[in-house]
Amino acid sequence: MSKQPLVSVVMASYNEEPEIITKSIKSIQDQTYRNFELLIYDDSTSPETRKAIDAFTEDERIKVFRSPERVGFVKSLNLGIKAAKGKYIARMDGDDIALPIRFEKEVAYLQAHKDVFVVGGQINIINEKDEITSSRKYPLGGAQLYFFSCFRNPLAHPTIMMRRSLVDHGFQYDESLKMSEDLDFWLRVMNKSLKIANVPDTVLNYRVADNFIEKRSDRKQVEYMANVRKKNFDSKHLFHSILSNAAGWTFTHVPVGAIQKAYKTENRQG
């Protein structure tokens, strides 16, 4: 194994249940692709969560970072992507479970598609008991993904792997945003005419709480996404920007119940 990791995994954690974050970290250790480092930016105040994370530090690939005061999710991500040593940077959340082939599939994709700068994948949705309750499919690329991004987030954030060159050229998460920071990132990448894509493989079990749909369709969340689309209006990509902003405006003016129904339809029952 090379001493220089090819993949840097950035995880921001905050008071996950010990058994949950243990499964999440273990799923990174169990990857078929082994040349990685895992950078955990831990904001946890729970001694049990901290203990669960620290139990993995005997693995020299895993590094834990803590600050005296809470850093926050988005800033933690920026600290992680800037500290990353790998050519590729992967995201991971402390409550999800990466499937063993995730890194293998994403690394292979980026190596084979030099024109793609961010790649994600398909997801299963699991509950707090690790039971698969549904799944979600994302377009693989091209016109279908381009059109999809006008209306929905085109990538599942915890599945993505990006080229380090994006960070080297100034891309980072907008720390003024309290949500939709990932959608903002992808729209900025697309506005630079850089390609994003998804592998066809299911690469992650995405954990959601029972009230996930209610949270995602919350009026504040919808308005935030609309503002992010407005923020990224780009006259050089006029067609995409008009559709994107029209979709954002529409979502803020339709009943919450209709949005919840759309989410349920998207999350195809398994």
Image (tube, helix red, strand yellow):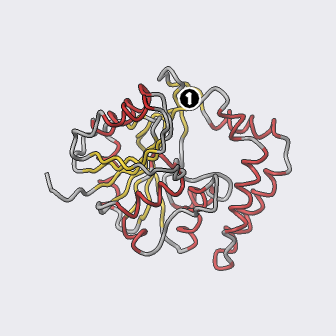
Q: Is residue 256 above or below residue 127?
A: below
Q: Is residue 17 above or below residue 107?
A: above
Indicate the quadrant where residue 25 lies. Answer: top left
Q: Nearer the viewer, residue 5 or 12?
A: 12
Look at the image and tell me whether residue 199 can be seen.
Answer: no
Would you say 217 lies left or right of 91 here? right
Q: Position of residue 75 (x, y in %)?
A: 51, 58
Indicate the quadrant where residue 249 lies. Answer: bottom right
Would you say 165 lies left or right of 58 here? right
Q: Position of residue 100 (x, y in %)?
A: 31, 36
Which residue, given by chain and number where applicable, does mark 1 sit on?
134
- The residue positioned 22% from the left and 40% from the top of the image is 59
Q: Position of residue 269 (x, y in %)?
A: 59, 27
Q: Tag 1, which secondary structure? A: strand
Residue at the extreme bottom of the image, as rendered:
236
Would you say 125 lies left or right of 41 here? right
Q: Nearer the viewer, residue 58 or 23?
A: 58
- Categorize mark 1 by other alpha carbons within 10 Å: few (<14), some (14-19), many (20+): some
Name which residue type carries label 1.
Answer: Ser
- The residue positioned 39% from the left and 73% from the top of the image is 168
Q: Position of residue 37 (x, y in %)?
A: 28, 50
Residue at the extreme front of the image, as rendered:
68
- The residue positioned 73% from the left and 41% from the top of the image is 217
Would you say 141 lies left or right of 30 here? right
Question: Which corner quadrant holds the C terminus?
Answer: top right
